[in-house]
Image (tube, rainbow, N blue to C red):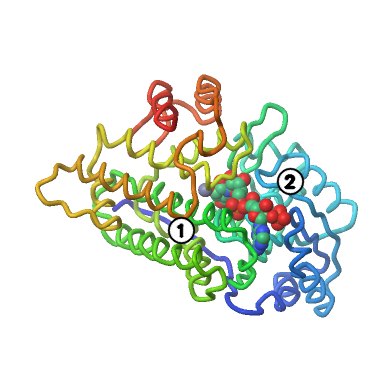
Amino acid sequence: MNNFTFWSPTKFVFGRDTESLTGDLVKQFGGKKALIVYGGGSVVRSGLLDRVKKSLDDAGVAWEEMGGICPNPTDDRVYEGIGLVRAHGIDFLLAVGGGSVIDTAKGIACGVPYEGDFWDFYCGKKVVATAMPVGVVLTIPAAGSEGSGNSVITKKDGLIKLSLRTESALRPRFAVMNPELTFTLPPYQTACGIVDMMAHIFERYFSNTPGCETTDRVAEGLLTAIMGEARKVIDSPLDYEARANIMWSSTLAHNGLCGTGRVEDWASHFIEHELSAIYDVAHGAGLAVVNPAWMTYVVRTNPSKVAQFAVRVMGVVPGEKSEREIAVEGIARLKSFYRSIGMPVTLGELGIAEPDIDRLVAKLHEHKGNPIGGYVKLTPADTEQIYKLML
Ligand code: NZQ
Ligand code: ZN
């Protein structure tokens, strides 16, 4: 096990009706005037936005609002938000929504105190030194942004989707997590979230660092719980306990816990980010296609950890099989699971009939370097093969 720092200071306030505490939480973390950031309308239709506004009013916190954030959020809304914050004397960012909304709020949070272009942080020219406080009312368990220090934004000019990683500056001060808020999720979005949280665990689990049995078992336990509860939420969307378990899993999958003590991978996320940047597909659905293709490719040279996953999580019985055969069977079971929750496992099923693989590979390595990944280091020749395995 490697030396590590685990930093997860967000205050998670979990359970029924917790959104009524939002105003008090903003005040507790020093907010006097909040910018409420939200998405394309689900929080308006469900009445959540009104309840959050009332909670702010009751706590004496003033607010402005900025709605209409789209999935795969873009830089133009971050610039708009920075302008609003500066013009209205806002001191707190309140994201009411999922990863796209939270990441936009985080982009604004680091952009406001900085005199230059906020994009400098995303393209690695500058390191975030200070950021405004962000609070979250989560409506979809998926991206894990409520407990991560990361933000993913797409620059419209050139369709460049980049993730900014900070250790602490962009971790939300609090996250309100009421599983009932997820009852209204369309089944497709529920499934996308399930795939994404599993992918966040895979990126950390598929590692060559030895001596991480505790972290491995945490990851395997989470994966097992997610897959079991996933079937329940797909069959019974109003099952509170299943929704609650899925929601808490999404946070634990991505707050750093599953990466403690080891080198992480992240190649699959980089490979997917090019798909969602160019073709605007849901990130989770993209990962359902990428993850099995990536696994299929890496087991050719490094099957051991995929075989461990196959046995401990996917229930493959090793018998006389080789590590590679065990791994391959585990991948087949994973694909069946994704299909069973309504996810695509090929680019065609994802709606990308004629992918421009040359462009995907070129953009991937231009943005993310060469090679990428930790479990197996991937050059453009490798990632081209992985995109082809998705056909
Ligand atoms: O916009 P509205 O109308 O709210 O609808 C949203 C959106 O269409 C809908 N939705 C959310 N909560 C709902 C709901 N519909 C009904 N009822 C509810 N309770 O779901 C759709 C997707 O929302 P979005 O916020 O885009 O989903 P998600 O949380 O999956 O976020 C995806 C974004 O996060 C990035 C992804 O790349 C993508 O841009 N990621 C961010 C990460 C991070 N910051 O740490 C890590 C991830 O790996 C990921 O890359
Ligand atoms: Zn993800």
Q: Is residue 166 visible?
A: no
Name the side, left or right, on which 50 lies relative to 267. right
Closest to the observer: 263 or 75? 75
Q: Residue at x 64, y 69 (%)?
A: 181
Callout 1 amino acid:
Ala
Q: Residue at x 86, y 51 (%)?
A: 84
Instruction: Give how far across and how far down residue 28 sits, in percent.
Output: 71, 75
Is 219 drawn above or below residue 301 in the view shown? below
* Mark 1 surroundings: few (<14), some (14-19) or many (≥20) residues within 10 A: many
Q: Real-space Cα distance between discs 1 and 2? A: 27 Å
To which residue does mark 1 refer? Answer: 253
Instruction: Give how far across and how far down residue 341 sits, in percent.
Output: 47, 55
To which residue does mark 2 refer? Answer: 111
Is 254 drawn above or below residue 45 in the view shown? above
Residue located farthest toward the left when viewing the structure as drawn: 320
Hey, which quadrant is residue 324 in on the image? Answer: top left
Q: Residue at x 25, y 37 (%)?
A: 302
Quick check: marks 1 and 2 in contact, CB under 8 Å?
no
Hey, which quadrant is residue 303 in on the image? Answer: top left
Helix, strand or loop status at disc 2: helix
Closest to the observer: 51 or 32? 51
Instruction: Give how far across and how far down residue 4 sits, in percent.
Output: 39, 54
Q: Earlier in the sequence, mark 1 or mark 2?
A: 2
Find out if the beta carbon at label 2 lies less than 8 Å from the nearest ligand 1 atom: no
* Mark 2 surroundings: few (<14), some (14-19) or many (≥20) residues within 10 A: many
Callout 2 amino acid:
Gly
Is 283 drawn above or below residue 29 in the view shown? above
Instruction: Give how far across and how far down residue 218 sits, in percent.
Output: 34, 63
Q: Is residue 252 visible?
A: yes
Name the side, left or right, on which 127 lies relative to 195. right
